[in-house]
Amino acid sequence: MALLRSLRIGPRLGVAFGLLLAMMAVLAATGLVAVVWTSDRVTTVYQNRAVPLQRLGELNQLLQRNRALVMDMLIDPGRANVERHAQEYAQNDQRMQAIWTDYQSRPHDPDEQRAADAFEQARAAYVAQGLDAAARAMAEGRYDDAQELYLLQVKPQEPAVQNALHALLAIKLAQANQEYEAAQALRRTVTVALIATSAVALLLGVWLAWRITRSITGPVRQAVQVADRVAAGDLTARPAVRGRDELGDMLRALATMQARLSTLIGDVRDVCDNVAAGTHQIAAGSADLSQRTESQAAQLQQTAAAMAELNGAVTRNTETARCALESALQARAAAGDGGRLMQDVVATMGDIAAGSHRVADITGVIDAIAFQTNILALNAAVEAARAGEAGRGFAVVAGEVRGLAQRSAAAAREIKDLIANGVARAQAGSALVDRAGDSVAGMVAHIERVTALIESMAQASLEQASSLQQIHLALGHLDDTTQRNAALVEQTTAAAESLRRQAGHLADAVRVFRLEPSEIGRLPG
């Protein structure tokens, strides 16, 4: 507190607002770090979690499509059908290799890498020993070998491939959940930090406002009390001057004025004593009256100038306060915009999560269709065995299989659309985060403007204090000079006997003022 009292009002307000702005900067920095960290987490979830899940889903679809192609070739072993399906089978196999290469190029932890190796091993055996062998047998016209390979190699190995894939997907989902939990933990930490910093800033602001208000109102109250006592005629009060700010200067000036006024009252008593000695002082009194009248006119001019300066300072202070209020409202609006933008980001992330759930549902539909296709294929094989070469029921079963394959293709397209939608929403979330950063920057600019306006208000307050000091000094001199002028005028218009009587009245009037014992002189009898 001694440090605050030693500062002038301008630097004192600057220190207070500087501390508050520092706390606000800490709040802004904390929020910005949280936004950047969240953006990194979203990017990680998309590139290392969502995209690999999409790739694995596409790979599984192509794998199931190749199995369906082999089944279709077994159902319709015609040369044209086999060649067409064999060409599509080869294209799908190339796409699966490209997808798997892209998946392997992304970062993996040890558990995910082991699961990926297990899936690749199961898939390689499933494709090489089952699907590829059956497809080659159909291409070479070995229908029985192809059917045997499908029943003995493809179907027995399919559960292992699906289990390995499900294990890999479970790891990816667990990793995504870990990212979500980490984001939630950061949100809680940032929330606590922001609340704590805000509380500290609030308490610091209240404390500084209280201390600065006391440091200003205390000396002003003391100055008013001293002025009231002087107005009542008590010149014994001495203001306690502490501090080197503008208010301390005012109290020192007030003490100086009081001391000079006491000296002046003593001089008046001496004048009364001299007047009682004889009428020869009338001429000197008249000359003194003329001089004091000129002094009074000059002091009145100073008073008018000081009042004009005070009026200008008050006008500027009012305008500055209005501008400060407008800037504060703009800062509050900018902060509100930032909050709403962050809410939009959260909503967008929720939409992405919903799309992911929809992907899981559609994958279930594809699995169900694959299961039904398998049953129909078995029924087709049994029907073909019973019908021999005729195979009328075989055609019906083949039609059902094609219908289910179309449903699988539709589900795959829907999955692709959902994934694209998720990517678009993630980009929208990134854009919202950028806008939130711009909003925070705007808020900082408005706060800087508020600081400049408050400094201007402090300067206007300094001008007011200086003007008030001049008014007090001028009014004190004006009052004393007026009283002395009245006494001198009465002395110049009365006779010698009346002059002595008026001197007694003047002495009685001077006794209204209380002086220190050392300053009390002899009053005229």
Image: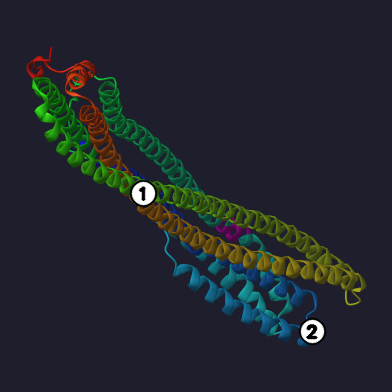
Is residue 162 within the magenta segment? yes
Q: Residue at x 62, y 81 (%)?
A: 90
- Number of dots carrying numbers: 2
**Residue 192 can be seen in this image:** yes
What range is drawn magenta here? Answer: 159-165
Task: Work out whether 306 lies above or below 102.
Answer: above
Which amino acid does the dot numbered 1 rest on? Answer: Ala
Q: Residue placed farthest to the top in the image?
A: 525
The secondary element bearing badge 2 is classed as loop
Nearer to the camera, 157 or 460: 460
- Name the kind of residue labelled 2 in the image: Gly
Q: Which residue is mark 1?
A: 308
Label 1 element class: helix
Question: Does the residue at mark 2 contact the one at mark 1 (Cβ under 8 Å)?
Answer: no
What residue does disc 2 label? 78
> Residue 374 appears at what percent x and percent y?
75, 62
Residue 448 percent coordinates (x, y): 38, 55
Q: Measuring 88% from the left and 77% from the top, which residue is drawn there?
A: 389
